[in-house]
């Protein structure tokens, strides 16, 4: 691995400061030097490093996706995700993992997998170099109850293989289920605490008993694992705080009490609302039969309004809100995840700076890596993006693959910057 | 990695056309889209037009190689059980990784000879064809179909579950018909039958023959009906004859033969292919000690006897004009993936091939065994652009074919799977 020196770049270091002109030296898998340059400042000499002249490009930390489903296969329903055979499914996951890295997500937090071992296997394969992908935390399947979100069995086809999630009923079944996923090697357990309107159980409903939730968290903690919850309803958000469920997905219907609870424990939780799902289900899913009239009837428009209000309130209270969520459906295809940052600016009222920080500075602790990622600083892991343009003036450019000039993960270029081609003749030997 | 479909012009190359007839000649080759559109015998400059010009600087350009007996899903373990116990998800990713490595090693076509779980080969073939993963042209095989106690039945008496078995264990003609139909439903190109035993299996050595004619006939009937191919593991003399009797045209191993078997092979030589998998015999006899099989043990297992018999049988086949092809049983700890091209050296050293004949066995014959003789396996106008660029002359030194550094470039379907190294003028890159 050659050392790499980025010169002539505008550095966004993840600390919230205005970007500055400078240079970044990468040695091995870490950033070893960050210097400001300017009139009169001379860059230190480097021997043997590959020099990448950024020509003024924007250099920022690799982004962290906080709610990732590699195994969702860009289909319009849970059933059609579930029906993909396991062999094809694992190849699909590998392809998606690569795509995320391509698009600048150097770390992803698995939020649930569609078959028991997909996430674990993909994480391991990334770590041992079998496939290319972001740093990844592997999730379990969605744990749910009969009739809840993720129970896709039909009355006449009750086999568990037909279920998208892992269906449990009772504390001891929950315990067995958690233990099984821990045995498989997941990093986190996913529990569906609330409903999801499209599945028939409204988002404001909550399906688990307290005892089941307590058992899940207790068992996960015994194994040193994290719990993440699908929690749209008011009650489910409060349960997350009450039981110490660290990762709260959606949190659409947060009332004053829920907001107070979250604020009081704001450094113990991460909230990833997954607004893309709500926005696109309400407005961009007509091609799949989900016209605005249909989704209004389902309750999604009301939920979108509630979610926007909740996120605005959480932002004001300094609760950590992270991007990512439920990409991998037909109307939220993989790779378009950076739309979340645009949504944060447009709907939640974040500044572009806040939106960028939500994908970088909050990403380190979300990945359980503290400040080792999400920053351009000496000693940080070298997860670096080189962007053509300024995301602070147009957050939308992060959605454009062509504007992401280079992606480096752990000191190695996944995508090297394009080189100016002088000639078309090549010498083979 | 994607390369825009366009023209590529290889200039200043020594063309080894793969026919086995023509000595290499200096010239240039033009590729347009997926095809070779021009092969010129002149060293003079050719107008490049918009083509990407690859100046070979005298390197050898030859057809991509064909591996006639490939097991992508063998995982370089030392036993069948070690392959079988790999979980499904990991197994698929492993298989994908191996497929890519074969292509980059110069095998642009591979003929699946059996896979370790029912759908692995089919899924990998489909993923390659869909462009989802890189890999050679591939014909997908079934699992090995065997009988209780035969090669591939890895069930233990106290664990009699089919999931523990490496192959699919059948008993009786109708059972074989059902399993054949299942694999055909899955979409295989070939059905693999283990007609003979193998010295690797205690109690079912290489000279034993296991299936009834009724079983083989039931399989053959189904396979013919759907236009697919049967391929067989046939080490024993009786199994070679049985295969030929049932019209089976791709025979693996064929170590033990007698005059009758050789006469039968010769009579069918325009249709039959033999891929002996000579590499694994050599490896077990000489290189398997780290895995507990020292020379004495290999001899006791019967490998010395089989090696001698196989060399004699294959020399005779070669003399009689039977097509003998390289490839076979790479993917074990003692015979790992990517050493495959060593078969060609063994053909020359032990089977009486000339280097030119060895090359022909993986080029001209490769296109034939892949069932695309009219468009695959040669450097010829109108043929598919599956090409290797080699630093050196394989006719002088076949070993360069298994040296990644000497394989400068690999092209499949007109697209580089391995790009030729470009002379780097500077270590300086501009981003914008």
Image (cartoon, rainbow, N blue to C red):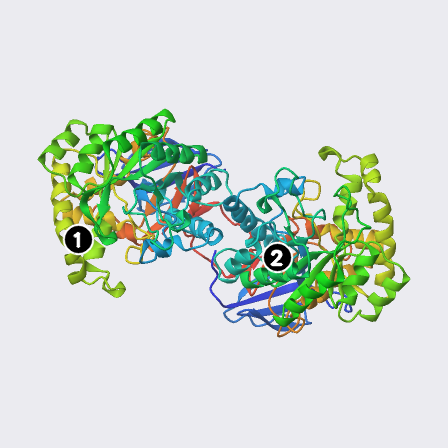
Query: Can residue A43 be seen by looking at this rendering?
Result: no
Residue furthest toward the right?
B259
Q: Is residue A349 left or right of residue A122?
A: left
Query: Can residue A188 be seen by looking at this rendering?
Result: yes
Q: Nearer the viewer, residue A63 or A375?
A: A63
Q: Residue at x 60, y 67 (%)?
A: B385
Quarter occupied by residue A414: top left
Dot 1 corresponds to which residue? A300
Q: Is residue B134 left or right of residue A244?
A: right
Q: Nearer the viewer, residue A411 or B43?
A: A411
Instruction: Locate residue B88, reporting x and y percent.
Output: 52, 46
Instruction: Locate residue A251, reporting x and y percent.
Output: 19, 41
- Helix, strand or loop at mark 1: helix
Quarter occupied by residue A252: top left
Q: Please tell me whether residue B411 is drawn above or below residue B42 in the rendered image.
A: above
Q: CA distance from mark 1 to mark 2?
A: 48 Å
Instruction: Locate residue A148, reporting x and y percent.
Output: 27, 46
- The subunit letter for the residue under badge 1 reads A
Q: Is residue B134 left or right of residue A203?
A: right
Dot 2 corresponds to which residue? B142
**Residues tagged by mark 1 and mark 2 found on one chain of the structure:** no
Instruction: Locate residue B226, reporting x and y percent.
Output: 61, 70
- The subunit letter for the residue under badge 2 reads B
């Amino acid at each position: 691995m050659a050392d790499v020196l980025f010169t002539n770049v505008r550095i966004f270091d993840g600390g919230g400061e205005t970007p500055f002109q400078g240079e970044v030296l990468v040695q091995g898998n870490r950033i070893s030097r960050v210097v400001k340059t300017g009139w009169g400042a001379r860059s230190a000499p480097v021997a043997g490093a590959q020099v990448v002249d950024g020509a003024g490009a924007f250099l920022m930390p690799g982004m962290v996706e906080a709610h990732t489903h590699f195994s969702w296969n860009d289909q319009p329903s849970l059933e059609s995700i579930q029906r993909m055979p396991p062999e094809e499914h694992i190849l699909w996951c590998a392809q998606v993992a690569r795509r995320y890295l391509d698009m600048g997500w150097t770390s992803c937090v698995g939020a649930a997998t569609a078959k028991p071992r997909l996430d674990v296997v993909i994480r391991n394969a990334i770590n041992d170099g079998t496939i290319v992908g972001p740093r990844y935390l592997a999730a379990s399947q969605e744990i749910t109850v009969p009739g809840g979100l993720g129970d896709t069995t039909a009355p006449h086809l009750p086999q568990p293989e037909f279920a998208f999630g892992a269906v449990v009923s009772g504390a001891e079944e929950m315990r067995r289920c958690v233990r099984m996923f821990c045995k498989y090697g997941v990093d986190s357990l996913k529990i569906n605490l609330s409903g999801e309107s499209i599945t028939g159980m409204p988002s404001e409903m909550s399906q688990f008993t307290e005892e089941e939730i307590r058992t899940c968290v207790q068992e996960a903690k015994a194994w040193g694992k994290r719990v993440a919850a699908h929690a749209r309803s008011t009650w489910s958000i409060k349960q997350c705080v009450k039981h110490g469920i660290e990762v709260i997905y959606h949190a659409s219907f947060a009332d004053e009490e829920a907001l107070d609870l979250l604020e009081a424990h704001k450094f113990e939780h991460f909230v990833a609302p997954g607004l893309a799902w709500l926005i696109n289900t309400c407005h961009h899913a007509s091609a799949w039969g989900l016209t605005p009239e249909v989704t209004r009837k389902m309750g999604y428009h009301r939920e979108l309004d509630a979610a926007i209000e909740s996120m605005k309130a959480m932002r004001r209270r300094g609760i950590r809100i992270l991007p990512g969520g439920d990409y991998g459906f037909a109307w939220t295809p993989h790779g378009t995840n950076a739309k979340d940052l645009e949504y944060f600016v447009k709907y939640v009222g974040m500044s572009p700076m806040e939106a960028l920080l939500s994908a970088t500075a909050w990403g380190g602790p979300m990945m359980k890596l503290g400040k080792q990622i999400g920053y351009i600083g000496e000693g940080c892991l070298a997860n670096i993006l080189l962007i053509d343009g300024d995301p602070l003036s147009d957050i939308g450019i992060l959605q454009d693959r062509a504007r992401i000039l280079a992606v480096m993960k752990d000191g190695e270029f996944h995508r090297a910057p394009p080189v100016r081609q002088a000639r078309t003749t090549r010498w083979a030997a | 990695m994607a390369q825009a479909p366009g023209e590529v012009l290889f200039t200043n190359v020594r063309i080894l056309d793969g026919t086995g007839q023509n000595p290499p000649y200096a010239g240039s080759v033009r590729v347009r889209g997926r095809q070779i559109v021009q092969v010129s015998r002149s060293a003079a400059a050719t107008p490049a037009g918009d083509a990407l010009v690859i100046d070979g600087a005298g390197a050898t350009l030859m057809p991509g190689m064909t591996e006639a007996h490939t097991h992508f899903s063998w995982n370089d373990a030392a036993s069948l059980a070690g392959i079988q116990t790999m979980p499904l998800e990991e197994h698929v990713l492993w298989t994908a990784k191996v497929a890519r490595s074969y292509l980059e090693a110069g095998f642009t076509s591979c003929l699946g000879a059996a896979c370790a779980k029912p759908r692995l080969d089919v899924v990998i073939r489909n993923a390659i064809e869909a462009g989802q993963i890189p890999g050679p042209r591939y014909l997908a095989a079934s699992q090995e179909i065997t009988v209780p106690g035969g090669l591939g039945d890895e069930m233990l008496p106290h664990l009699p579950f089919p999931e523990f078995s490496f192959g699919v264990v059948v008993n009786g003609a109708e059972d074989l018909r059902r399993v054949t139909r299942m694999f055909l439903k899955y979409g295989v190109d070939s059905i693999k039958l283990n007609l003979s035993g193998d010295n690797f299996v205690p109690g079912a050595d290489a000279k034993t023959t296991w299936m009834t004619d009724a079983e083989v006939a039931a399989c053959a009937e189904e396979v013919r009906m759907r236009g697919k191919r049967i391929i067989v593991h046939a080490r024993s003399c009786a199994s070679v004859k049985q295969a030929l009797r049932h019209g089976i045209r791709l025979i693996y191993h064929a170590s033990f033969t007698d005059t009758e078997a050789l006469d039968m092979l010769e009579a069918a030589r325009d249709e039959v292919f033999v891929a002996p998998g000579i590499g694994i015999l050599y490896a077990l006899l000489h290189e398997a000690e780290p895995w507990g099989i020292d020379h004495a043990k290999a001899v006791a297992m019967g490998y010395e006897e089989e090696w001698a018999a196989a060399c004699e049988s294959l020399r005779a086949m070669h003399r009689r004009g039977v097509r003998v092809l390289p490839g076979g049983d790479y993917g074990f700890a003692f015979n790992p993936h990517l050493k495959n091209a060593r078969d060609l050296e063994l053909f020359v050293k032990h089977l009486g091939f000339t280097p030119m004949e060895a090359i022909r066995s993986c080029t001209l014959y490769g296109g034939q065994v892949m069932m695309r003789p009219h468009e695959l396996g040669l450097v010829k106008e109108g043929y598919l652009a599956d090409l290797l660029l080699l630093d050196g002359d394989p006719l002088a030194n076949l070993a360069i074919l298994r040296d990644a550094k000497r394989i400068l470039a690999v092209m499949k379907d007109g697209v580089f799977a391995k790009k030729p190294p470009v002379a780097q003028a500077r270590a300086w890159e501009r981003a914008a």
